[in-house]
Image (cartoon, rainbow, N blue to C red):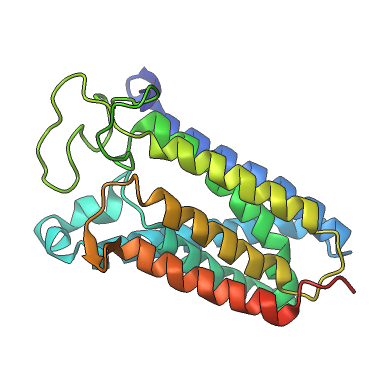
Amino acid sequence: MYPVLYHNAPFTIYSLGVLWALAAVCAGYVVRLELKRYRVDPELASSMVFAAAAGGLIGARLLLILEEWSHFLRSPWDFIFGGSGFSWYGGLLGGTIAVTWWVRRHRILWLKAADIAAPAGALGYGVGRVGCFLAGDATWGKVTDVPWAMAFPNAVAGWIDPLTGVPYPPGVGVHPTQLYEVVQSLFVFGVLWILRKKRYPHGTIFWLYLALAGSMRFLVEFWRVNPVIALGMTEYQWISFMVVLLGGCLVYRNGMRAK
């Protein structure tokens, strides 16, 4: 993989940072289009995306710290300032809290802002996962012999089994689950982008985003290297199940009927 795109001491360009920046640009463009469609000042797009990104990064790192508390205590600075290791659901929660603050500040209906942000969130996540793939930040999947299996010997987080900490032997292939999530996110974005112009009750697009994104994360966990905690499911599958249930119930309540 290519964790470093360019290096000429002391200047280094990391693929993860470049793709995350591109993800923010793509999300900002989508938000700008949606703000304009809702007749809200499109110049607010950059501040909305900045709030979501800042809150998302903080939330993603905080949830990871809680999940890996014993490891955090052994090396706190690496967890806080390291370039890899984030929790998607922590990012979703942190981003939602930050956008809620932004919405209150600009006096925009929360459900309307959520609908505006949903397609942008799906697209931005997909583009960001390309950065995770190029950097090899340990979000790869289980060992496999499928034709598209890949190895990540130059990964920023080390080419090891995340569960055992044992390095993989040379030539061992795993599921490139980062790319699976790219495809999933683009699918979610496409569905939301097609449906967004239908006159559904405010909030419907966002609730649908929760249901779709949660189901996609539930599915990819079957190929990810995460420990099972109960009834054959991982922690993130349980969280995904609850998110899908929440989103699905709220979509059903709204009726998915265009006005």
Depth check: give the residue in front, 91 or 191: 191
Label total for image: 0
Residue 112 % position (x, y): 75, 72
Q: Residue at x 81, y 51 (%)?
A: 33
Could you tell whether 158 is left or right of 145 in the image? Answer: left
Side of 29 relative to 156 (left or right): right
Q: In this rendered view, identify the residue nearer to me: 227 or 134.
A: 227
Q: Position of residue 244 (x, y in %)?
A: 52, 68
Pick the front one: 118 or 95: 118
Point out the image quarter for the C terminus. bottom right
Q: Residue at x 19, y 45 (%)?
A: 162
Q: Quadrant for residue 90, please give it.
A: bottom left
82 or 23: nearer the viewer: 23
Can I make out residue 102 in this image?
yes
Residue 51 seen in this snapshot: no
Q: Is residue 255 left or right of residue 48?
A: right
Taking 201 as reference, is 12 above or below it?
above
Percent across and percent down for residue 124 are 58, 47
The residue under the point 27% across, 26% down is: 173
Residue at x 54% of width, y 48% of height? 125
Q: Is residue 164 above or below residue 257?
A: above
Q: In this rendering, is residue 32 above or below 96?
A: above
Looking at the picture, how far across and down is residue 187, in whole percent? 63, 45
User: Relative to 253, does residue 197 appear above or below in the rendering?
Assistant: above
Q: Is residue 34 left or right of residue 149?
A: right
Quadrant housing the N terminus: top left
